[in-house]
Image: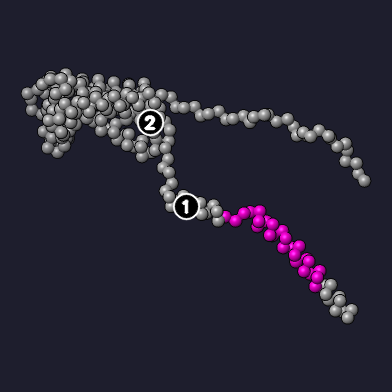
Amino acid sequence: MLDNGRVSTDPNTEPDAPDEAASPAPDAQPKRRVVLLGVIAAVVLALDIATKVIAVAELEGRQPIELFGGLLYLPLIRNPGAAFGMAEGWTIVLAIIAFGVVGFILWIARKLRSVGWAIGLGLVLGGALGNLVDRVFRSPGPLRGHVVDFLSVLDPWGGFFPVFNLADSAICVGGGVIVLMSLLQRDYDGTRFEKKPSGKAAVSAGATTSGATPVGSTTSTTSTTPETTENQTAGESADGGKQAQA
């Protein structure tokens, strides 16, 4: 009989393992994008105010200036309504809505961590502030001021498309960027949101999981097949020997 050596009486023969598995470090959150939001909004606001001041100084009392062979015209229109000449006569209501939009953007800015959302919200914020400045400081009075519009496409007086300004363009482009980020399932806090599976998809997934064949049972059946065949062969040989002796 071979001696396998001394048997250890220590119940714990495994190598010492750490009490707690090292947990992976949590993913670092994206940086806040408040500065980017503020810079974009400030640039849009500055450009909008500067171009409106120049438009009033150069276009007051003049016919529209044609540019690029009639592709763009520079008229001067004072608009009491919303962007692109809509909702005329709602000046006070539109001013209050603009205050609400600005306040909402500033409120969510503290959680803003997405570059795309920062660009979109910065454009919207700068455009809203640009038109809000007109409504507060231009005639005929506070919250009733008319917005200066001076850009017209393919027609001197907005016959093809309503006359607009840089603030209107920034609001539209920013809104498009926000819609794009939503379609890409990107949230303003830098996270990615995914749609939940529909009820039919969840039921199909559950049925597939419950109907799967266990791997162990297939292996067990396969391993017992040769043994059964050998037993049957041995039994047949014994029966044949008994018949020969008889």
226 drawn magenta: yes
Q: Quadrant where the C terminus lies?
A: bottom right
Magenta region, mostly helix, strand or loop? Answer: helix
Q: Residue at x 43, y 36 (%)?
A: 192
Q: Amino acid at mark 1?
A: Val
Q: Nearer the viewer, residue 76 or 111?
A: 111
Q: Quadrant of residue 178?
A: top left
Measured as percent of width and height from the top left, residue 204 is found at 48, 53
184 drawn magenta: no
**Which mark lies nearer to you, 2 or 1?**
1
- Looking at the rendered structure, the number of numbered marks drawn on it comes to 2
Q: Residue at x 43, y 50 (%)?
A: 199
Instruction: Specify start and end residues of the magenta stretch as a single range.
Output: 212-236
Measured as percent of width and height from the top left, residue 30 is found at 44, 27
Q: Nearer the viewer, residue 168 or 76?
A: 168
Q: Quadrant of residue 143?
A: top left
Q: How are the residues colored?
A: one colour
Residue beneath disc 2? 188
Instruction: Answer whether residue 152 is visible to the viewer in this image.
Output: no
Measured as percent of width and height from the top left, residue 68 is found at 17, 32
- Using residue 117 as the reference point, say whether residue 242 is left or right of it: right
Q: Amino acid at mark 2?
A: Tyr
Residue beneath disc 1? 203
Q: Quadrant of residue 138?
A: top left
Q: Earlier in the sequence, mark 2 or mark 1?
A: 2
Disc number placed over residue 75 in the picture, else none: none
Q: Residue at x 62, y 29 (%)?
A: 22
Q: Is residue 205 above or below residue 13?
A: below
